[in-house]
Amino acid sequence: MISLKGFLRRFFSDPVAIGAGLVLLVLVLMAVLAPFLAPQNPYDLMQLDIMDSEMPPSWKPGGDPRFWLGTDAQGRGVFSTIMYGTGISLLIGIGAVIVQAVLGVTLGLIAGYKGGWIDSFLMRLADIQLSLSTLMMAIIALALFQAAFDANIYADYAIIMLIMVIGIAEWPKFARTVRSSVLGERKKEYVDAARVIGLPPRKIMWGHILPNTLTPVLVISTIQVAEAIMIEASLSFLGLGMPVDRPSLGSLIRSGFEFIFSGSWWITLYPAIVLVALILALNLLGDWLRDVLNPKLRRGED
């Protein structure tokens, strides 16, 4: 395992990692501090005025200094909605990956350690799920949920539904990653020693094998957060994600798409830029982590 000193040294010596880290840090701080720093609360109807709708950015003719990135069709400042929307997108992405990790790590650990018919059954189940499109499964599940409940109930539970649907659909990636690591670990001497002293399989799996399989889990988690955010953005763009009154980056892009050819390009453009920056930063950090934590690529570095 690479030391913290070596990890930080490699991070600060890589301009791409530093750039991606700074972009991610700015976006996370922007999302966390949105209630305190945003010029406007887009969820508070008392702060909205329909007369402020579709104002261009403040440096364009007709712009207002209060809204430096312009406003949308409801009179909400685009900058404020981006700050709040980034927080919702990150919440869904991180929440979905937690669900994926809990399911995938548990099933992958059991499959790799137990082997036999349990391994075969779980991996064939993973194969079936991987053969299906995550986006298609999410569309079907969310469409049924929207049809079964009214708009108010859907708005209240949209975040939970998105987290659960995306998380359950993507667990096989964690399961396969953990299983492959467990297959290599279960034959090592420390596992044999734990069996000899009489430790139950549960303690061997969770207390001894699992800690040695967390490196690939950390790498895949970073990449999966980006993928979950992208899936949520796609669902929101299709009208099956977050409701209009609680926008994510995807629903912000969708809400402004119909105005882009009428001249109000800023409603879609700026949320799209933030979404691309967020996805790119997460993917670059995931690739960098994979290279740093891969023993074959470290070449003996601490």
Image (tube, rainbow, N blue to C red):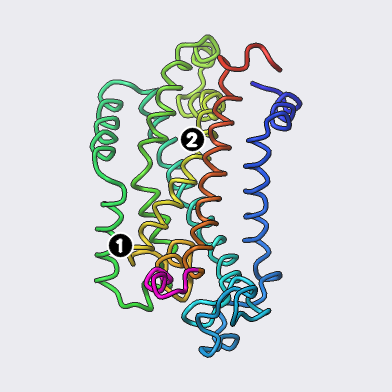
Give 83 or 209, whichever is nearer the viewer.
83
According to the picture, the residue beneath numbered tag 2 turns out to be 220
Q: Amino acid at mark 1?
A: Leu
Residue 266 placement, left or right of 27 = left
Q: Amino acid at mark 2?
A: Ile
Magenta part of the chain: 255-265
Depth check, front residue: 60 or 31: 60
Neighbour tally class for label 1: few under 14, some 14-19, many 20 plus, Cα within 10 Å: many
- Residue at 64%, 21% (x, y): give it: 1
**Residue sitting at x 38%, y 78%:** 152
Q: In the rendered view, would you say 49 is above or below 71?
A: below
**Residue 131: where, in percent of width, then height?**
24, 38
Q: Is residue 32 magenta?
A: no
| Disc 1/disc 2 C-alpha distance (Å) | 25 Å
**Whole-percent x, y for residue 124 in the image:** 24, 31
Q: Report the residue at 27% width, 52% height from top.
A: 137
Mark 2 residue crowding within 10 angstroms, few (<14) / some (14–19) / many (20+): many
Whether 278 is drawn above or below 126: the answer is: below
- Quarter of the image with the C terminus is top right
Give the residue furthest to the top: 189
Q: Does residue 258 show up magenta in the picture?
A: yes
On the rendered structure, is 262 left or right of 138? right
Give the quadrant of residue 161.
bottom left
- The residue closer to the viewer here, 198 or 45, is 45
Dividing the picture into quarters, in which one does residue 13 lie? top right
What residue is shown with label 1?
142
Front-lying residue, 239 or 118: 239
Q: Residue at x 26, y 52 (%)?
A: 136
